[in-house]
């Protein structure tokens, strides 16, 4: 053989070091993807302010689309809130009402629709 498989051989030692470095790089990338998945899950189901879609959510978007637990409505709501605020220039009072309503929706969760229906009915 051209290269003897012993540590005494410098070429073989160089190949072992390159393979070890490559393995470390792959492990770091894999750990990064797993971290993005975990942070994305916490962003989607956690109770936090969602005024933008973070980079780590975008990183795993393609690999998680259509999977069990993927909720597209969260992303659509964020984008509709961002686009609506940029597309229209409301007066200050209406913008404050919108911000307060968004805070109420985040705090109340599933109960907010009932509260809004009661308010619209005049009660």
Image: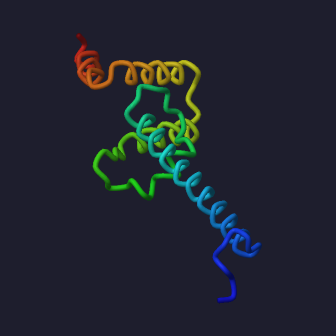
Q: Is residue 6 above or below residue 63?
A: below
Q: Nearer the viewer, residue 22 or 62?
A: 22
Q: Nearer the viewer, residue 89 or 100?
A: 100
Q: Is residue 34 above or below residue 122?
A: below
Q: Quadrant of the N terminus?
A: bottom right
Q: Is residue 44 above or below residue 17?
A: above
Could you say which quadrant of the image residue 18 lies in? Answer: bottom right
What residue lies at 37% left-to-right and 33% top-to-bottom? 45
In this figure, what is the number of numbered marks? 0
What residue lies at 58% left-to-right and 21% top-to-bottom? 92
Q: Nearer the viewer, residue 31 or 76?
A: 31
Q: Quadrant of the C terminus?
A: top left
Q: Nearer the viewer, residue 19 or 97?
A: 19
Report the coloring of the rendering.
rainbow
Q: Position of residue 84 (x, y in %)?
A: 50, 39
Q: Position of residue 88 (x, y in %)?
A: 55, 38
What residue lies at 54% left-to-right and 45% top-to-bottom? 56
Q: Position of residue 58 (x, y in %)?
A: 52, 50
Which residue ends up furthest to the bottom in the rendered image? 1
Q: Position of residue 94 (x, y in %)?
A: 51, 22
């Amino acid at each position: 053989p051209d290269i003897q498989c012993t540590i005494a051989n410098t070429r073989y030692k160089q190949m072992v070091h390159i393979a070890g470095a490559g393995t470390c790089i792959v492990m770091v990338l894999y750990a990064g993807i797993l971290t993005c998945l975990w942070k994305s899950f916490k962003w989607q189901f956690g109770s936090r302010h969602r005024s933008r879609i973070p980079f780590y959510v975008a990183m795993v978007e393609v690999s998680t689309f259509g999977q069990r637990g993927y909720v597209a409505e969260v992303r659509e709501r964020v984008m509709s809130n961002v686009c609506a605020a940029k597309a229209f220039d409301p007066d200050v009072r209406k913008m404050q009402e919108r911000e307060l309503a968004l805070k109420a929706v985040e705090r109340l969760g599933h109960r907010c629709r009932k509260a809004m229906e009661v308010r619209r009915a005049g009660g």
